[in-house]
Image (cartoon, rainbow, N blue to C red):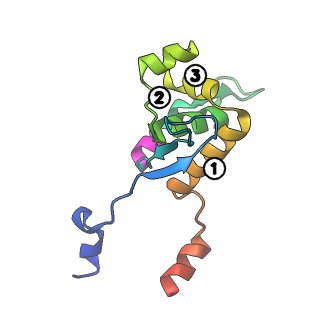
Amino acid sequence: MSSLQAFFAQNVEKATMKEVFVSNRFKGEDGNPIKWKIAPVTADEDAAYRKSATKRVPIPGKKNIYQPETDYDLYVLKLTTACVRFPDLNNSELQNSYGVMGAENLLKKMLLPGEYAELTKFIQVVNNFDVTMEELVEEAKN
């Protein structure tokens, strides 16, 4: 296989779904905590979530001049919600049980702050935001 062929879609390793314990509060019939299923998003999807969390704000003192401002918390919420595959955050019965509408509102209602923080850390790992360029270079050397 030539070097270029390694980049062909059919030769690239597919991103896999991961399972993680988000909380000990969600238990199965056997009484054990249930794992959540998490999958990465594509760069295009990520850009859409970032764009939807960005608004134009006027620059003080400059008439009709705006700059983009991203609401990082909203972006992370959108990304996290999109990556959660199980439980199905779009399930209306699940949303009704918490008295909310929408996957993002459900996630905020379901999890305690520490649980949400841990989930977002795992989302960063699944989407490779935790890997630095130095680590990639070192891995390639070995």
| Residue 46 seen in the current view | yes
- Farthest bottom residue? 142
How far across and how far down the image is residue 59, in percent? 72, 29
**Eyeballing the image, is 8 above or below 79?**
below
Q: Nearer the viewer, mark 3 or mark 2?
A: 2
Q: Amino acid at mark 3?
A: Asn
Return the residue at label 3. Answer: 105
Seen from the viewer's position, the closer of residues 117 and 124 is 117
Seen from the viewer's position, the closer of residues 20 and 119 is 20
How far across and how far down the image is residue 28, in percent? 50, 36
- Please tell me whether mark 2 sits on a helix, a strand or a loop: loop
- Please tell me whether mark 3 sits on a helix, a strand or a loop: helix
Seen from the viewer's position, the closer of residues 11 and 90 is 90
How far across and how far down the image is residue 58, in percent? 68, 25
Q: CA distance from mark 2 to mark 1?
A: 18 Å
Q: Which mark is residue 121?
A: 1
Is tag 2's residue or tag 1's residue first in the polypeptide sequence?
2
Return the residue at label 2. Answer: 89
Q: Amino acid at mark 2?
A: Leu
Q: Give the residues drawn in magenta, as a range.
A: 43-47
Q: Amino acid at mark 1?
A: Lys
Q: Quadrant of the N terminus?
A: bottom left
Q: Is residue 6 left or right of residue 117?
A: left
Is tag 3's residue or tag 2's residue first in the polypeptide sequence?
2
Q: CA distance from mark 1 to mark 3?
A: 19 Å
Label 3 crowd (10 A; few <14 / some 14-19 / many >=20): some
Tell me the residue at 46%/45% (across/down): 37
Tell me the residue at 57%/12% (across/down): 99
| Residue 50 seen in the current view | no
